[in-house]
Amino acid sequence: ETGVTQSPTHLIKTRGQQVTLRCSSQSGHNTVSWYQQALGQGPQFIFQYYREEENGRGNFPPRFSGLQFPNYSSELNVNALELDDSALYLCASSLEARGETQYFGPGTRLLVL
Amino acid sequence: DAKTTQPPSMDCAEGRAANLPCNHSTISGNEYVYWYRQIHSQGPQYIIHGLKNNETNEMASLIITEDRKSSTLILPHATLRDTAVYYCIVRSVKETSGSRLTFGEGTQLTVNP
């Protein structure tokens, strides 16, 4: 059974660009949650996707958007990158949207210059 | 979700038990206590969770007080590889807005040789 995987592992972008991060959920999991972790802080919830629909959103602007595909993998898109978007982006998958343990991937480190 | 309070840092000698406390005095009846840890720059790793009863698995034990206002994570024989930030999270399993995890600052546990 493979765990949660994310790609790429590292990424460097410049301010104003757009970025797409990818996440493959653990086998059998239909829910993916995305988190942003700035340096020295705990992860902050961005949004969750459950069976291809957004199922809850944290305090992030609309330029943070996502998708979930029929195989339950997911993408996080960030438009008009800002310097403060530099962070570790984590995805976590779970069996269902509520009441199930979330298992995290290794993260994607994004640096915005 | 209820807020948690953890000490910012703790030290433990290798081979000894590490006892990490967490206060969650505003926890409600349908909220679980979850513990994750994060080794530097990796994704958070799920450790254990519980509702009212004490729980044990291959990684750790979780002791929850009878009034559920605090808990202790116990690593019975800490090793150097247990050095990490440990997060105590209280999480509702009945919320309708998705099942986000709300991370605080966590406790930096350092295991010393």
Image (cartoon, coloured by chain):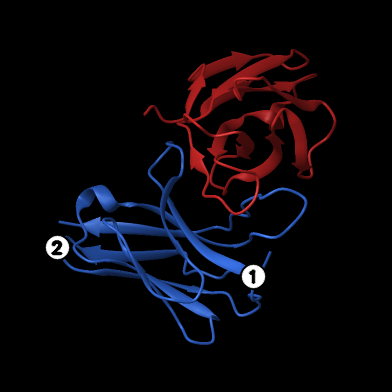
Chain A tint in image: red
Q: Nearer the viewer, residue B82 or A29?
A: A29
Q: What is the crowding at mark 1: few (fewer than 14 residues within 10 Å), some, or many (at least 20)?
A: few
Give me the chain letter of mark 2.
Answer: B
Q: Nearer the viewer, residue B32 or A35?
A: B32
Q: Is residue B96 above or below residue A82?
A: below
> Is residue A25 found left or right of B48 in the rendered image?
right
Q: Which residue is mark 1?
A: B30
Q: Which chain is blue?
A: B
Q: Is residue A30 above or below residue B76?
A: above
Residue at point 48%, 20% (across, down): A9
Which of the marked residues, 1 or 2, is nearer the chain's N terminus?
2
Q: Amino acid at mark 1?
A: Asn
User: Residue B97 at x, y = what percent?
Assistant: 77, 50
Residue at point 61%, 52% (across, down): B101
Residue B15: numbered disc: 2
Q: Is residue B13 above or below residue B70?
A: above
Residue at point 53%, 25% (across, down): A108
Residue with the most extreme right position: A62
Q: What is the crowding at mark 2: few (fewer than 14 residues within 10 Å), some, or many (at least 20)?
A: some
Q: Amino acid at mark 2?
A: Gly
